[in-house]
Amino acid sequence: MHREVFEHNDAWQSAAIAIIGRDLFTRQALERLLRAAGMEAHVFESTRDFLGCGRVEQTDCLILHTTLPGMDCPELREGLRGMKTAVPIIVITSPAAVGQPQNLSQHGIVACLASPVEWETLREAISSALQRGGKAG
């Protein structure tokens, strides 16, 4: 990849990103990519793991990798509501699921991206999520 792909954005230096996904290789790949871009990244296998980690309030953005639309969003939304916190969510899902009608903002979702996602698309979605959460730069 080109060096400019991983140019660090000042807001990203302190950004804590959580990645939730059932596929180990996808979680690890996203974690490495975000760390290379200068972010703090933490991976979780499930929404329950994330909600029980004790770091939810320090999370600036959550990336939910799922193959089914809305699979973990209701559980996640209820857990976050119970903690009285809001974390901007980016969903990466199958191309077929992206086009399905859904009320994204109802679940705190700032972007729904088709897998595999291009780095530039993911970077823009993360920037949007950080702006929404107050870490714009």
Image (cartoon, helix red, strand yellow):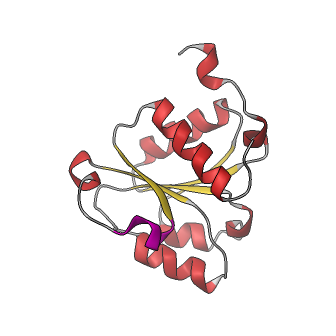
The residue depicted at 29 percent of the width and 52 percent of the height is 98
- The one of 53 and 12 positioned closer to us in this rendering: 12
Is residue 49 visible to the viewer in this orientation of the structure?
yes
Q: In this view, does 1 lie above or below 136?
A: above
Q: Where is residue 132 in the image (x, y as percent from the top left)?
A: 64, 57
Q: Position of residue 70 (x, y in %)?
A: 34, 67
Extreme bottom residue here? 82
Extreme top residue here? 2
Q: In which quarter of the image is the C terminus?
A: top right
| Magenta portion: prevailing SS class | helix
Q: In this view, does 11 lie above or below 71?
A: above
The residue depicted at 49 percent of the width and 73 percent of the height is 76
Q: In this view, does 105 lie to the left or right of 19?
A: left
Q: Where is residue 135 in the image (x, y as percent from the top left)?
A: 74, 51
47 in magenta: no
Q: Position of residue 127 (x, y in %)?
A: 61, 43
Indicate the quadrant where residue 52 lies: bottom right
- The one of 13 and 32 positioned closer to us in this rendering: 13
Q: Residues in magenta?
A: 103-108
Q: How many labels does the image show?
A: 0
- The one of 111 and 84 positioned closer to us in this rendering: 111
The residue depicted at 79 percent of the width and 46 percent of the height is 14
Is residue 17 visible to the viewer in this orientation of the structure?
no
Q: Is residue 78 left or right of residue 131?
A: left
